[in-house]
Image (cartoon, helix red, strand yellow):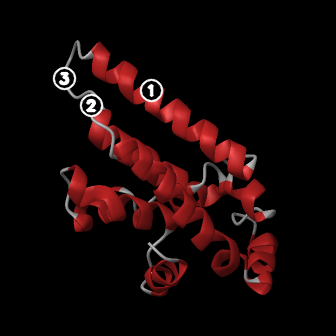
Amino acid sequence: MTQEFVLEQFSQGFDCSQIVLAEVAENNGLDAVTARRVSACFGGGMWCAGCCGALTGALMAVGLKYGHAVPQETDKKDRALTVMGQLRKKFVEKYRSTECKDILGHDLSIPEEMQQILDKGLIAGVCPGVICSTVDMLNGYLNVSN
C-alpha cells in the first residue's frame, strides 16, 4: 500500500477505516465491498474525533482473523484480545495516542477545527502515512499462524 493509493481512495470518498479493512479483507474471508460497508461509520474517529479510523479498521481485521463467534470460544477471545492489545500498543508507541483529534491536532467534529484541518491539508498530509503504517503493523499480526 502506498500513500498515493490512499489519496486515490480518499478521492473516491473512502475513509481511513474503510481503506484499512478493505486492504486486508479478502485474505481474511471478507470481500472488499462488504468490508467497506461494515467499516463505513468509523472514519474520523466515528466522526467525533475518537479512536483513529485506521486503528479501528485494523481492529476489525483482527476480529476477522482471531475473533470468537460462538459461545465458549474463550481461547479465540483471549487470542483476539492479546493481538488487539499488542497492535494498539504499537500504534500508541508510534502516534502517542489512539485518538484522531490527537493525531491531527484538531477535532474534526468541531466545524472551526475541521476547517483548520482542511486549510492545513492535514488529512492528505497525515492520514495516508498513518494508514500505511497501520496496515504494515496489522500485516505482521495477520500473517502469523493461528
Mark 2 to mark 3 CA distance (whole Å): 17 Å
Who is closer to the viewer here, 47 or 6? 6
> In the figure, is residue 74 to the left or right of 29?
right
What numbered label is drawn on residue 124? none
Amino acid at the residue labelled 2 = Asn
Mark 3 is surrounded, within 10 Å at the Cα level, by few (under 14), some (14 to 19) or many (20 or more) other residues, namely few
Q: Where is residue 66 in the image (x, y as percent from the top left)?
A: 30, 33
What numbered label is drawn on residue 81? 1
Q: In which quarter of the image is the C terminus?
A: top left
Amino acid at the residue labelled 1 = Leu
Mark 1 is surrounded, within 10 Å at the Cα level, by few (under 14), some (14 to 19) or many (20 or more) other residues, namely some
Amino acid at the residue labelled 3 = Val
What numbered label is drawn on residue 146? 2
Mark 2 is surrounded, within 10 Å at the Cα level, by few (under 14), some (14 to 19) or many (20 or more) other residues, namely few
Who is closer to the viewer here, 116 or 146? 146
Q: Identify the residue position indicated by label 3 in the image.
A: 70
